[in-house]
Amino acid sequence: MTRSKSLVVAFAAALVAGGAAAQGGAPAGDAAKGREKVQMCQGCHGIDGWRTAFPEVYSVPKIGGQHPAYLVAALKAYKGGDRTHPSMRAIAAGLSDQDMADLAAYYAAPDMKTAGK
């Protein structure tokens, strides 16, 4: 199995596990608290067409409307080193599980406002 396929399989497993954990003890996200924590996120993820130049040119995805379990799993993967983008790893390293759940709830909200709106 290639490394990219292995990562996809591992990420899918994390999503399934994250969904199970959400039902049995993972913190519930609070969108209002998440709104207070998005300063580090909005500079990249809230701007249409934004690209980073470090460590390479990369089109930054807008994450508004994304499923919260996916966002939490992605943040945990950055924090744990399974995803390797240096900026995201540094940001995720300082997040607690509650922070991740709150940010995910904020970005998953249907009325979420971004810097571009």
Image (cartoon, rainbow, N blue to C red):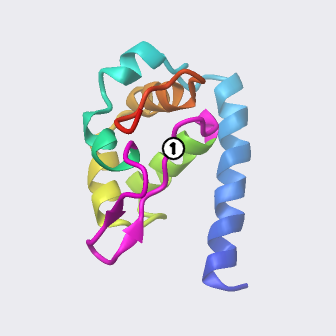
What's the magenta bit mostly, secondary-structure-wise?
A: loop
Q: Tell me the kind of residue under disc 1.
A: Ile
Residue 97, horizontal then vertical, whole percent: 43, 32
- Residue 22, by quadrant, is top right
- Residue 42, by quadrant, is top left
In reply to whether residue 61 is colored magenta, the answer given is yes
The residue shown at (27%, 45%) is 43
Along the viewing direction, whichever of 7 and 63 lies nearer the viewer: 63
- Residue 53, by quadrant, is bottom left
In reply to whether residue 39 is colored magenta, the answer given is no
User: Is residue 6 placed above or below 104 in the rendered structure?
Assistant: below
Residue 107, horizontal then vertical, whole percent: 50, 32
Along the viewing direction, whichever of 88 and 23 lies nearer the viewer: 88
Disc 1 on helix, strand or loop?
A: loop
The residue shown at (48%, 64%) is 82
User: Is residue 82 placed above or below 6 in the rendered structure?
Assistant: above
The residue shown at (45%, 25%) is 102
Which residue has dot 1 on it? Answer: 63
Dot 1 surroundings within 10 Å: few (below 14), some, or many (20 or more)? some
Give the residues drawn in magenta, as a range.
Answer: 46-69
The N terminus: image quadrant = bottom right
In the displayed structure, does residue 77 sit left or right of residue 10?
left
The residue shown at (40%, 70%) is 58
Along the viewing direction, whichever of 48 and 101 lies nearer the viewer: 48
Q: Residue furthest front?
A: 117
Residue 3, horizontal then vertical, whole percent: 61, 81
